[in-house]
Image: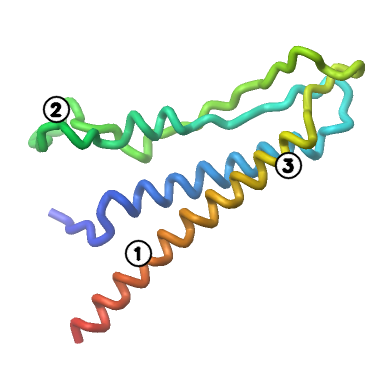
Amino acid sequence: MAINIFGSSFSLLSKVLDLRSQRHSVIASNLANVDTPGYKAVHVAFEDELKKALPETNTLNLAKTHTEHIPTQGSFDDITPVVIKQGRHNPRPDGNTVDMDKEFVKMSKNQMMYSAVAKILGKKFEGLISAIREGK
């Protein structure tokens, strides 16, 4: 049996970075198409899928002892973001639904969240490196 030195938090944090990166690409695409007639803005939603995959704190600690057993919690690898077309009630006369101000706010918020998760992941690696150095 392999030992996972990173724990489940590493998987979660790396998945969140991937999802945040995908959200950034979609927001950038929306901004790039701000002047494209008929373009419909899209949004990446993944928070609900993340919540489903996280273990609940008040549950039994069950072990999966056979490959055919039902998993006790979702896998972070199975989280797939949902790309949603955003419909605005008042599209511009050319049919474009991109609101540049809202997209910049979303990008800013996404960048802050990405940076925070990257810092947390960096601290986890620092702790692992420190443990390795102390073990010499």
Q: Amino acid at mark 3?
A: Phe
| Occupied quadrant, residue 6 | bottom left
Which residue is more in the foreground, 60 or 70? 60
Q: Amino acid at mark 2?
A: His
Q: Determine whether label 3 and label 2 are within 8 Å by CB.
A: no
| Occupied quadrant, residue 115 | bottom right
Classed neighbour count for the residue bearing mark 3: other residues with Cα under 10 Å, few (<14), some (14–19), many (≥20): some
Q: Amino acid at mark 1?
A: Lys
Classed neighbour count for the residue bearing mark 1: other residues with Cα under 10 Å, few (<14), some (14–19), many (≥20): some
**What secondary structure is found at the residue carrying circle 1?**
helix
Q: Which mark is residue 124?
A: 1
Q: Which residue is mark 3?
A: 104
Which residue is more in the foreground, 104 or 72? 104
For marks 3 and 1, give the CA distance.
30 Å
Classify residue 134 as left or right of residue 84: left
**Residue placed at 53% from the left, 26% from the top?**
82
**Residue placed at 66% from the left, 47% from the top?**
108
Sequence-wise, the earlier of marks 3 and 1 is 3
**What secondary structure is found at the residue carrying circle 3?**
helix
Mark 3 or 1, closer to the camera: 3
Q: Which residue is mark 2?
A: 69
Classify residue 60 as left or right of residue 41: left
Mark 2 or 1, closer to the camera: 1
**Residue placed at 82% from the left, 34% from the top?**
33
**Residue placed at 45% from the left, 33% from the top?**
47
Relative image position of residue 9 (x, y in whole percent): 31, 51
Relative image position of residue 96 (x, y in whole percent): 83, 22
Which residue is more in the foreground, 96 or 101? 101
| Occupied quadrant, residue 60 | top left
Classify residue 70 as left or right of residue 105: left
Q: Considering only vertical position in the picture, is 123 above or below 98?
A: below
